[in-house]
Image (tube, grey):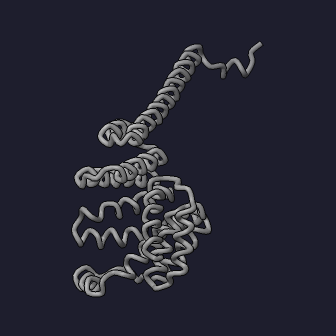
Amino acid sequence: MFSFFTQIQPPARFFRVGFLLAICFGLIAVKSFAADLCFINLLEQGNQAAQRGAVANALKFYSTAEPLAATNCADLCLLTKRYCDLMHITASPEVQKNLAERALSVALRAESVNSTNATARLCVAVCYAKNFPYVDTETKVKWSRAIKSECETAIALDPKQDVGYYLLGRWHFGVANMNIFLKGLLRIVYGGLPAASNAEAISNFKKAIDLAPHRIIHHFELARVYEAIGKEKLARVELEKCRDLKPVDLDDADAQSAAEKNLTELR
């Protein structure tokens, strides 16, 4: 007896095509997993080289890993951090410049992949600052505005980003304490910078500390502001915290060393 279902049964070639598609998608998934694994391995090898102080070798591993992270925002952000970390362990200005430029390039790619990712936004802000020693005044003014904008956007996207408040605090502190003649010159030639204050710097550093009290960099920068406005007792409290906390990365380690030096000078 004729059945309606016999009219919609797929032909045998449909099953063959489906089988081939399943194989193709499976191969794509395997390839993606292999690429992820290779990226992780390269980063680990680069990290091991960095720990030995072999900056050139570490850079080779990270450079090889870079194409594998082409469209992965999280991986690109991680790679940005690795390039920035290498800047701490080389004394060569030329190598530091190269690393800063690479980090910014990768950070901008991360942001282009996902402009709503708060970490990517902050990576760009950090890398603009890292490149300040190597660009002209006009670019510094342009990037300074961009740093503030990137931080504010990142905080709006994720209010729990302690690094966003930390960077915004540093921006306020740097601009607020800029030489008055330089600030006037920038206003005349380049249109100036947005308003900034030590009070805003303190507020942002305190917010960063509330979110991540274990980060030495937050306490150290807050201490710097207190020192700048003559509140040495408050500065000493923050510097002592820096001394007692355990560094979580190279930025923290550098801040701890600087804090110990400042403590000695305050006594």
Q: Position of residue 191 (x, y in %)?
A: 28, 82
Between 188 and 265, the residue placed more toward the observer is: 265
Q: Quadrant of residue 209?
A: bottom right
As displayed, is residue 17 above or below residue 207?
Answer: above
Residue drawn at point x = 54 percent, y = 72 percent: 238
Between 17 and 66, the residue placed more toward the observer is: 66
Residue drawn at point x = 24 percent, y = 64 percent: 135
Residue 219 relative to residue 82: left or right = right
Q: Residue furthest front?
A: 267
As displayed, is residue 50 above or below residue 137?
Answer: above
Q: Quadrant of the N terminus?
A: top right
As displayed, is residue 92 above or below residue 45?
Answer: below
Between 222 and 123, the residue placed more toward the observer is: 222
Q: Position of residue 74 (x, y in %)?
A: 49, 47
Total residue callouts: 0
Q: Position of residue 249 (x, y in %)?
A: 48, 53
Between 217 and 24, the residue placed more toward the observer is: 217
Q: Position of residue 57 (x, y in %)?
A: 32, 37
Residue drawn at point x = 38 percent, y = 52 percent: 84
Residue drawn at point x = 24 percent, y = 55 percent: 93
Q: Residue furthest right?
A: 1
Q: Is residue 109 visible?
A: no
Q: Is residue 230 visible?
A: yes
